[in-house]
Image (tube, coloured by chain):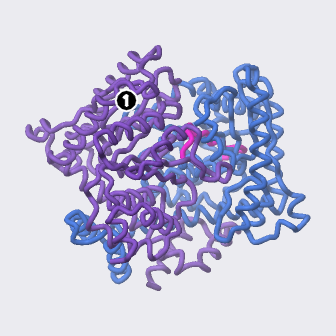
Chain colours: A blue, B purple
Amino acid sequence: MHDLASRILTGEVRAAARVLRLIDDRSATGVQVLKDLFPHTGRAHILGVTGNPGAGKSTLTDRLIEAYRKQDKKIGVIAVDPSSPYSGGAILGDRIRMMRHAVDPQVFIRSVATRGHLGGLSRSARDMVRVMDAWGADVVIVETVGVGQDELEITRTAHTTLVVMAPGMGDEVQAIKAGLMETADVFAINKADREGADSTMRDVELMISLGKESLIALGKQKGHVVHGASAAAEASAHGISSANASTVEEAWTPPIHKCVAVAGKGIDELVAAITLHHRWTLETESGRLRRRRRLGEEVRESLREALIEAATNALHEELDAAVLAVEAKELDPYAAIENLVKKFLERA
Amino acid sequence: MHDLASRILTGEVRAAARVLRLIDDRSATGVQVLKDLFPHTGRAHILGVTGNPGAGKSTLTDRLIEAYRKQDKKIGVIAVDPSSPYSGGAILGDRIRMMRHAVDPQVFIRSVATRGHLGGLSRSARDMVRVMDAWGADVVIVETVGVGQDELEITRTAHTTLVVMAPGMGDEVQAIKAGLMETADVFAINKADREGADSTMRDVELMISLGKESLIALGKQKGHVVHGASAAAEASAHGISSANASTVEEAWTPPIHKCVAVAGKGIDELVAAITLHHRWTLETESGRLRRRRRLGEEVRESLREALIEAATNALHEELDAAVLAVEAKELDPYAAIENLVKKFLERA
């Protein structure tokens, strides 16, 4: 076992931070340490926290850390930033509050930028989660800012996804919410002291009931993988009939909790709901099936990245030549790809 | 040439719509038609319209269509929706206004969902653009709702990216803007009659001036591909010294235009700026270099998708077995991928 791996397993923060940097640089040592750590992972509860901009995710995450620390739990936090050359990877203003926990040796906070991840952002996030898990975190919180497909991918690395909403968002934002609905396990209506909280709550209730129906319908369509919270849909995606009573009884319906994160109100109830969902993933057949399916997605995604890396290395000159030929309209891009794949496989 | 391809080339909307459905289903006929059409593409100006939720992108797109129609131009519109089982692919409320143009035979509007694109959303968008281009569109507008990485990818398929902003957005939204800054060629400050428009304008000016510096700095770092609007950075990414005077003189600095889309104010100036940028992409060396680089990105992306498809077909059973072994902790996911890649290449 690599020295860094043993030091992480004894709970040394500095060793863990060092390995996170190695992973970021895609060093071979980083991969070696991840291999060494892997048998010692799987204990942490991975909690995704997501939602629209302005919903108050960072303030709520701060409160969740506080609540877990009262339970004497060791916490890892991965804050995903929509950073760019302009923000330079600095922690966003909203997250300053959360940083009060950074002095606590039982809390390990790291920020990751959405840009520049050669192997894909969700792979980086997964590797970071594994390091924090091996370091001894009881809960790893992955907080994503933003509402894109990338963020949805990351929530799929979590065991439990908490979607944070706030009253009084516009029409378009409402539509984006729809994408989040499918990965939601628990809802928080934050800023619940504001006008419109009840109406937001009713909207979510309606979406959940509509969603159950459409997820089940989608799950029945062959070839569709349903990324949903409905156990019936999950089972259906695995070819288990939704008419099977024991499976349907295991169904998880996402609970909705009102809270006011800035005032610390409603947090304990929310933590209880999150913990209950964690038990669902561990103790029910539907929960276990979901864990397995997500692992399968991870393996496929990593395979994709490994293949393009091998092909890019093998085909460097041919790739450039193909681009020039397509530019000159001597070759169409579809035929160009067919040729490149053929050449790569012949050479390998 | 396939019958559908010839019919598209004569400007038949029904044939074009039919092929878009074939592409969506990933039918072999769809690919055949795309191959046939390819030599007849490259004439249309591809305009990406993006920005934060609530900035008024759809209303502005509606006005842009109107302005181009006054110039007697034929228009294609691809509206990218963050749809889900919940919205079922329906046009968003915001886009209803735009649909008044759908009855105009010289306007071809199609909506595409961000979900369920096996080959990737930006590939689908690119194929749709090609069909509209071959159909005879002078301008193809690709409007994306949302702010994720996926949307940024799509803007890279455009020749010109218009970033729409509005005064009075929050802190977090401001941060997300940063990601958009890098792909922006022209800025519109919409709702400019509202309070805060001048302050938003100053923010954008500051970001542009900061961005130029950091893009140039980034471009000098070996191995970094800079997705920026600065011609100097573009040239630098291609190994052309930014000290080369003729290249620097070609630099494009994104102009900022105030408008009030709902009242139709400021639209003509905006269209003029967009047209000027189109000329920049055609008539300068920097513009041509960018076109070639984006074509290169397309080829790489398509290669990635083709490889994973081939590997998934070849490795079906081994993939499932690997997932189970990783789940049982008999194998770590990193070694599992190494084995799978090796098996795929041996078999091919």
Which of the image's four quarters has the N terminus of chain A?
Answer: bottom right
Q: Which residue sits furthest left? A: B245
The answer, for residue B291, to whether it is visible in the render is: yes
Q: Quick check: is A214 in the magenta stretch?
A: no
At x 76% / y 29%, what residue is drawn?
Answer: A199
Please name whichever residue, A154 or A25, is drawn nearer the observer in this view of the structure: A154
Label 1, on which residue?
B188
Q: Amino acid at mark 1?
A: Ala
At x 52% / y 42%, what residue is drawn?
Answer: A17
Residue A35, horizontal then vertical, whole percent = 56, 62
Q: Residues within 10 Å of mark 1 (few under 14, many from 20)?
A: many
Q: Which residues are magenta?
A: A136-148
Up the image or down, A65 lies above or below A149; here it is above
Task: From the viewer's perspective, tell me whether residue B319 is left or right of residue A260.
Answer: left
Which of the image's four quarters has the C terminus of chain A?
Answer: bottom left
Task: From the viewer's perspective, tell me whether residue A248 is left or right of residue A59.
Answer: right
Residue A260, horizontal then vertical, whole percent = 74, 24
Kindly identify which chain the residue marked by label 1 belongs to.
B
Q: Secondary structure at mark 1?
A: strand
The answer, for residue A110, to whether it is visible in the render is: no
At x 47% / y 30%, what residue is drawn?
Answer: B175
Please name whichever residue, A317 or B80, is drawn nearer the observer in this view of the structure: B80
Residue B16, horizontal then vertical, whole percent = 42, 63
Please name whichever residue, B314 or A242, is drawn nearer the observer in this view of the structure: A242
Residue A259, horizontal then vertical, whole percent = 77, 27
